[in-house]
Image: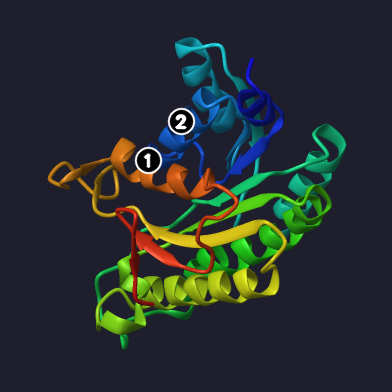
Amino acid sequence: MTVESELLYQRVAVVTGGAGAIGLEICRLLAAAGMRVVLTARSHAQAAQAAGVLQQEADVHLEPAVLDVTDPASVQSFGQWLAHTLGRVDVLINNAGVAPRGHGFVEMSDAELDLAMRTHFHAPLSLIRLVLPYMQTQEYGRIVNVSSSLGQLSQMGSRWPAYRLSKAALNALTAVVAADVAGQNILVNAVCPGWCRTPLGGPDAPRSAADGAADIIWLAMLPDDGPSGGFFRERQRQPW
């Protein structure tokens, strides 16, 4: 085992929404690289089933865990589990998401906006707060926020308002945290995986779930001199 592979073997990656199409591919790639992967889902059955699929494919290190990102109590319980079970986090991938609804601003309900903000903004914020002390102690961390081009202010439009607003907030969170931890070897970036063939994206999407996951993994495994505080699509920096 090389020094690099030994370091990867010791590292812990947390993936939210790990049982979904892209989430499962993220976990597959991280585990294949040698990391110990915490695959989270809303229920233990979902997490265990997804982890079982990957463990049948290869001898990988996976920890299924319950995490409903929309429930603050679940986030708190997950933090306690993490502290008692693993005691470290090297990589956090905020991948969990809810589908956009294609109506206009006037039709957007308070409940719809609340769910989008809790999922895409408040949960990543809480999880980043949870893992940063580990990363600062280790002097190493990679945080990847899975965002969307629909959240870019540079091309903001009128449809999918709750989704757009919540992803724009996630992009802002990315920039704020990256600036706050600058110089600490903690790299924080946002990424748009593109239109992928998933239950959400549909069968006509041009990219596979594995394609979208590969771009996320690229940011999760950046070298120490890699970028931070950016928004990327297909490994190219995009305007906010």
- Which labelled disc corresponds to residue 22? none
Reading the image, the residue beneath label 1 is 214
**Mark 1: few/some/many CA within 10 Å (<14, 14-19, 20+):** many
| Residue 24 picture location, percent across and down | 45, 34
Q: Is residue 84 left or right of residue 123?
A: right
Q: Farthest residue to the right: give it.
A: 84
Residue drawn at x 63%, y 75% as measured from the top left? 179
Does 238 appear above or below 53? below
Helix, strand or loop at label 2? It is: helix
The kind of residue on which mark 2 rests is Leu
Looking at the picture, how far across and down is residue 177, in whole percent?
A: 64, 71
Numbered disc 1: secondary structure: helix
Residue pictured at 79% horizontal, 47% vertical? 138
* Contact between labelled residues 1 and 2, with CB atoms less than 8 Å apart: yes
**2 or 1: tag closer to the N-terminus:** 2
Q: Residue furthest left?
A: 204
Most foreground residue, 51 or 148: 148
Q: Which residue is mark 2?
A: 29
